[in-house]
Amino acid sequence: MNNTLKANIIEANIIEANKIKANKISEIFADQKAFIAFLTAGDPSLDKTEEFILAMDAAGADLIEIGIPFSDPIAEGPVIEAANERALSASTTTDAIFDMVARVRAQTAIPLVFLTYMNPVFVYGVERFFSACQKNGINGIIIPDLPFEEKGEILSVAQAHDVDVITLIAPTSQDRIQMLARDATGFIYLVSSLGVTGVRSEIKTDLAAIVSDIRAVTQTPIAVGFGIATPEQATTIAKLADGVIVGSAIVRIIAEHGAASTPILIDYVRKMKAALV
Amino acid sequence: MSKGKYGIHGGQYTPETLMNAIIEVEKAYEHYKNDPAFQAELTELLNDYAGRPSRLYFAKKMTADLGGAKIYLKREDLNHTGSHKINNVLGQALLAKKMGKTRLIAETGAGQHGVATATAAALMGFECEIFMGKEDTDRQALNVFRMRLLGAKVHVVTSGTMTLKDAVNETFREWTTRVDDTHYVLGSVMGPHPFPEMVRDFQSVISKEAREQILKKEGKLPSAVIACVGGGSNAIGAFYNFIPDEEVRLIGCEAAGKGVDTALHAATIANGSLGIFHGMKSYFCQDEYGQIAPVYSISAGLDYPGIGPEHAHLHDTKRAEYVPITDDEAVAAFEYLSRTEGIIPAIESAHAIAYAMVLAPTMRKDEIIIVNVSGRGDKDVAAIARYKGENIYE
Ligand SMILES: Cc1ncc(COP(=O)(O)O)c(C=O)c1O
């Protein structure tokens, strides 16, 4: 065995030994409105992703969604799509992301949830993927192109490894809402608007009606995402739901400031968290 | 419960935002496919508007020159708009009309599907928007103008590899943004259920006719049916009614670009692996982490990193065979058919011609090959000239 390999194994063991037990997703909604921050792993580098996650955690984020970049993110608007391209150009791989997650998990108990597409999970190997999630401290996963009808692809394996498969509910879900909500675990991701991810000036969906349909069948907390960027929007949404998810606005900061994003992210997350009252 | 399965392939891997839209298409299709009035209306459009049935032509000079099996060409190139794409488009447009939709959106690679969709939109009074990768708007510029002439808006897609796969991504994104009044006319036997089944049914008119035509002309079935495969719609259309005839070899020709041993190809069966993408489980060109590979072919219509789920299943069960054909072989076949029979095929279809040129001489003279000429080559003339080093512009 060569020395770098040996050093890697020793380091891996230290991280394993130092791993902090993750908080449960449900705990973050217990006595407050939750702020959920999304970023794309590897944009601009995995070291920076680690730094950004810890900074947003310290600034008050309650859960971090980590995007595993995919070549063809069909649910994303231009901002996050570009982040996916930057991360992949920086040769970000699923294995390296797991290593980064392990380093984060050695330093914080904040719940961590992956967001990715079905193909990276399927091709990695469903069992191998979720066992790595469990080992490295991932609490949940969001897969936009895995609808209720196809959940069987991963559900039992994810459950066996203590990973919540987060349910997405859309403005077009209508008669499907209760079927979707009934088995939801972790939290429910309520998509605020039609279309792809991206900052929006106005959210037109009747969220209150959808929320009440959901509440009729489950106690699982509801977090609203897609298009939310400003503290004012966050305040409005927090009146209806248990949490607010922000992606594009954060990714846009990272796109603009790159490796120097940390102070701007801290400032932004603080403001957003303060707006959730 | 997962629907639309072909063995392990297929399914409905689609964002929740689109699930109700897809279920709506599924229900409408289930209803209208058994509705005689719908079928009669579609048949009338196919016959009187699109010019069906397409001819099954005995390629006498080609047969004599190759010196083996008798070669028949199924002339989808003679359809209105110049390819098989119109068969599917008329079916889906009519369905969209019945569903009360007022707007059609579609992806296109070579532009043939976009032209067919724009044509049906003009005919039936739909608003129409087409998504096409930048690389393809450059190499198929004539079709871009043709779509505009027909009243469609053409969006140039500059994300990802700027080819067919990215045009599909953008069209799905557009559909999630505006789903109420809009139908996505998917152009091949791919995507989430019910598209692979519905598009196959609309294209199976090719083999329905071809089977009757060959039995009438020759009194027997062919030994082989050959078609090119992008997503696989003309191929499944040409194969479908021969699937129960086990003695008929079904051969799909994939784009091998510069060669399957290079990075520049789009040969999904030869080099792909199992994955889940664009709504379906099937084979895809991809890396070990499931990132979809950039693919390449001289042919914009075959330049796609996946293959329809029914083909993946026909491959698994060995009912069909898939062979890679390089750019050089396709260009040689393009020129050969032009000179030998006076038929300029689409560069996509030339991939099928190329394999017929390999196979025919190895077969007996009393055997028959049917080659599906999926489209005509007018759109490709300038690009082939450039490939040959002649700097002509359209
Ligand atoms: C003439 C022609 N043939 C074949 C294809 C490939 O599509 P498919 O494999 O769905 O038939 C295209 C696509 O643009 C085409 O224009």
Image (spheres, coloured by chain):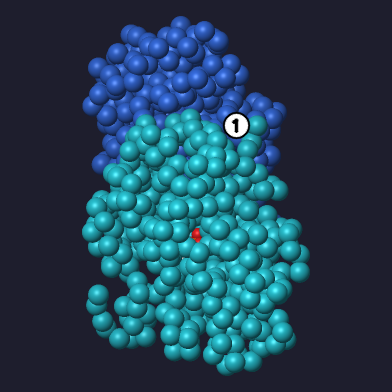
Chain of the residue displaying label 1: A
Decide if ligand 1 comes within 8 Å of the CB at mark 1.
Answer: no
**Which residue is rendered at x = 37% and y = 36% of the image?**
B101
What residue is pinned by disc 1?
Answer: A149
* Image quarter of the C terminus of chain B: bottom left
User: Which residue sits furthest right?
Assistant: B247
- The location of residue B154, given as percent across then percent down, is 27, 53
Instruction: Give the image quarter of residue B78.
Output: bottom left
The quarter of the rendered structure image containing the N terminus of chain B is top right
Q: Is residue B232 left or right of residue A152?
A: left
- Residue depicted at 42% across the width and 44% down the height: B94
Task: Judge left or right: residue A185 versus residue B186.
Answer: right
Q: Quick check: B375 above or below A206?
A: below
Hue used for the chain lettered A: blue
User: Residue B208 versus residue B335: which sits nearer the camera?
Assistant: B208
Q: Label 1: state its secondary structure.
A: helix
Residue B182 sits in quarter: top left
Asked whether residue B160 is in view, the answer is: no
Residue found at x 64% / y 66%: B211
- Please provide percent x and percent y for residue B108: 39, 57
Q: Quadrant of residue A207?
A: top left
In the image, B62 versus B278, the foreground residue is B62
Would residue B333 be seen by someone viewing this image from the given angle? Answer: yes
Question: Residue A141 location in percent, x, y?
Answer: 54, 31
Say which of A24 and B182 sits in front. B182
| On screen, residue B387 above or below B269 | below
Q: Residue at x 65, y 59 (%)?
A: B241
**Identity of the amino acid at label 1?**
Glu
Would you say A11 lies left or right of A203 here? right
**Percent of width and height locating residue B112:** 39, 62
Neighbor class of circle 1 (other Cα within 10 Å; few <14, some 14-19, many 20+) is: some
Chain B visual colour: cyan
